[in-house]
Every structure is written in structure tokens, then in C-alpha cells.
Amino acid sequence: MPQSRKNTLIMGAAGRDFHNFNVHYRKNPAYNVVAFTAAQIPGIANRSYPAKLSGRLYPKGIPIFPESRLAELIKKFHVKEVVFAYSDVSHLEVMHKASLCLSCRASFTLLGPEETALESKKPVIAVCAVRTGSGKSQTTRKIAKLLKNAGKKVAIVRHPMPYGNLEKQVCQKFASFKDLKKQNCTIEEREEYEPLVKEGFTVFAGVDYEKILAKAEREADVIIFDGGNNDLPFFKTNLHITVLDPLRQGHETSYHPGEANLRMADVLLINKMNSASFKAVQRLVESARLANPKAIILKANSELHSEGIEKIRGKRVIAVEDGPSVTHGGLPFGVATLMAKRQKAKLVSVERNASGSLRQTFQKFKHLHNVLPAMGYSKQQLRELQQAINSTKADFVISGTPIDLRRILRINKPIIHVSYELKELGKPNLKDVLRGFGFLK
């Protein structure tokens, strides 16, 4: 008798979960994926992974439920195996979830790179991190510029953020600001794509990374995979760079899958040297060398730039920060707050004026004080963000998000934008690394 397919549930956050399904489960007759669960990102549950993307084994598609229903779903669908497939989660939390699954008599699985990393026809550089908000984006921009200046055609493939219509987001290409608007990008998507598009680079993203990779390969000499949160690369790499954050020293070995990135990397880049204490940096170096003694260690500052910043000196300001970094990333503040403090500005809280999901965000992430996360995964969230800013008494908005908020919000206060770039310290540097791995002559 043929063996029955194993009922499987994939825990995710609209990213790694879809990728794992596409490359490992979609055509695999040994498994029957009965459901996805969704976490971290608001508004991505209670929909379906479409039948058109699911393959012939799943003619009705696959339902997506809130993760809060996990135990109920395991019993309802007679789940034999639960696959954990999202990132930036503490080791302790991962094992709590594993224990819940085991208590429901289901196995708990983590798929590795051998089963999920696609092979490219072009050389691949992966830029990953130990936590979200460590500085991947500025590192990607720096590498892309070095390659471009050497005459290389660069395609940047970004970790997925398909929070809208999945059928329309199978394979996305962003080469202009019009593309961002046309595809109804969320704030989180814009934060990643806009700075790269502004520099003249083309970004690819979406749902199906086999199709995305094939499209990027046709346009580039080199592929840069820019990982989301602290996820592992989706592609087999010729050079794996992991960014470390000394402001969260200790997290490099206590978060999943950031520790795996720490141990796998060819190069470890310690960022934010100008914001961290000497002791924190030393402890981080020791931890990195212990976990990955063969890796090359680079050091860098995250250098802040802002035009007209002197205007906020002594004024009341609302500090808008990168959403993922200060929410599930756990950072208490970002570059907007840092710059405001340097100018001795008075930070103003918008919490009392927050409504809807923004109010829920403040209730969930209680470490946020006088910081406004740029939450904008839906039109409703954008309205809530705009309303909170406009109804709060302040002289300026200082924005630490990489995007121009004026493109998507109508703000009744002047906005000062803070940008940040990677400034390398000493030798070796990224150019040396690229030369050593054969990307530059």
C-alpha cells in the first residue's frame, strides 16, 4: 500500500514559510501541508496561499491562520509535523513553541540551507545579520556601489515581504519610484527598496524565489541577497556576510536563526562602533571568534547625515523610527532618537493619540518610550500613523526611517530626515573582502 502523506503545518510570517513550501513541499508527495500560521506582521492571517501558486497537490490553495490557534489547528488537522519558518525569534521562544507542538504530539522541524537554498548561475553575495536593525541595508548599499564602480551589473534580491495580493506579488521588480507606487508597497517594503532605487539599483522580491532568481540572473553579473530580519540566505552563496550589533551584545548567540548566520558567515561585520561601549564591542568580538574562528572580522560605524538638523535644537520633536527594528527587533530607539538627543531636542510621545492597531503596537511593545514605529502594512495603518502624528503637539517630525514619509503621508509638521551610511574602520574592509573572494580585481 502507498504510504499516506504526512499532514504538515508551517509556522511563518509571510516570508521564509512560503519559500520553504515552494522549494521543499509544493511538489513533494510525501507531505500534505494543511495550513500556514502567521505571526509578527499584522493583517497577514485569515487569507489563503493561492491555488495558482500552490501546485497540483493543492488545488484549493492552503489556508493561513493566526499563530494563536496553533494547538487547536494541530488537533483539528491531525498534524504530524510542524515546521518553524520565520526569523528574529529568541532561542527561548522557539523552544516554547516547540514544546507546545510536542505536547500536542506533533514533531517540530527546522529546515536547513541544504534543503532550502537555491543554486544560482551567477555569483551570490548574501548580506545577513544576527538581529533585525543591525545594518544590513547600509552594508548592501556599500557593496552594491563598490561592484557598480568596478563595472559590474548588480541585481539585489530582497527577502520577501508579500503582505498584499500574493498572486500579483509572485515576482516583483523595482527599478523606479513609480514601481513602488504601482505595486502598493507598504512602509516596510519602501524602507528596503527606496534607498536602493534612489541609488540606481534594481531590486527583486516577491513570493517565488526560483522565478525571482531566474529573472535577476538575466540582468546581472552579481546577485546580492539582502536578508530580512536575521534570516538565512535563500540562495547558495559565494560570499556570506553577517552584520553584528554591539548595542545588543549577547543576542548574536541567543536568537534564531541569527546564531546560525554568525556561525556560517565568511565575514562578520561589527557595525555601530560609534554608538557602543568599548566593553560591549570587546565582548562581541570574543563571542564572534568563539562561534566562528575562521571568519574575517570587519568593523564599521553607522554614520548619520541630516540636512537642517540644527533647526530642531531645543524644539519638541516626534521621533519616527524603522518599524521592525524597534518592535520585534527590540531596539529601544533608532537614529531619529539619537540625532534628536544630540541636538538636545525634547522628545514627544504620540502614544496617547494612537488608535487602532498602532495603539495595540504600543501595548504589545512596552519598551517603546517617546518613539513612534513607522507601522504601515495597510492603508488603515497609514491613516493611524498620520493621525497620531498630526494630532500630537510638536514642532518637528524627525524621521529615522529610510523613506521619505512625504511620499505616502500628509503631515502637518515639517519633517527632518536622518539617513545613515556605513563608514568602514581600518583594514581589512569590504573592498579587500570582495577582491579576496574574486568579485573585484
Image (cartoon, rainbow, N blue to C red):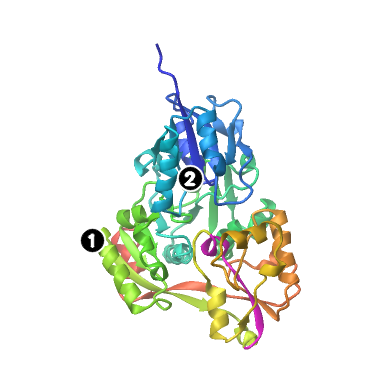
Name the residue rendered at 55%, 80% in the picture: 339
Image mark for residue 16? 2
Locate the C terminus by quadrant.
bottom left
Q: Position of residue 279 (x, y in %)?
A: 32, 76
Per the model, the C-alpha gap separating discs 2 and 1 is 28 Å
Q: Is 363 one of the magenta-colored residues?
A: no
Percent x, y of residue 98: 41, 42
* Residue displayed at 39% across by 11% down: 1
- Badge 1 marks a residue whose secondary structure is loop
Give the extent of the magenta segment: 314-327
Q: Position of residue 10 (x, y in %)?
A: 49, 38
Tell me if residue 318 is in the magenta stretch: yes
Residue 231's place in the image compared with 45, above or below, is below
**Residue 346: image location, x then y, percent:** 62, 83
Q: Amino acid at mark 2?
A: Arg
Viewer-side residue, 328 vs 16: 328
Q: Residue furthest front?
A: 103
Q: Amino acid at mark 1?
A: Pro
Give me the disc on residue 293.
Answer: 1
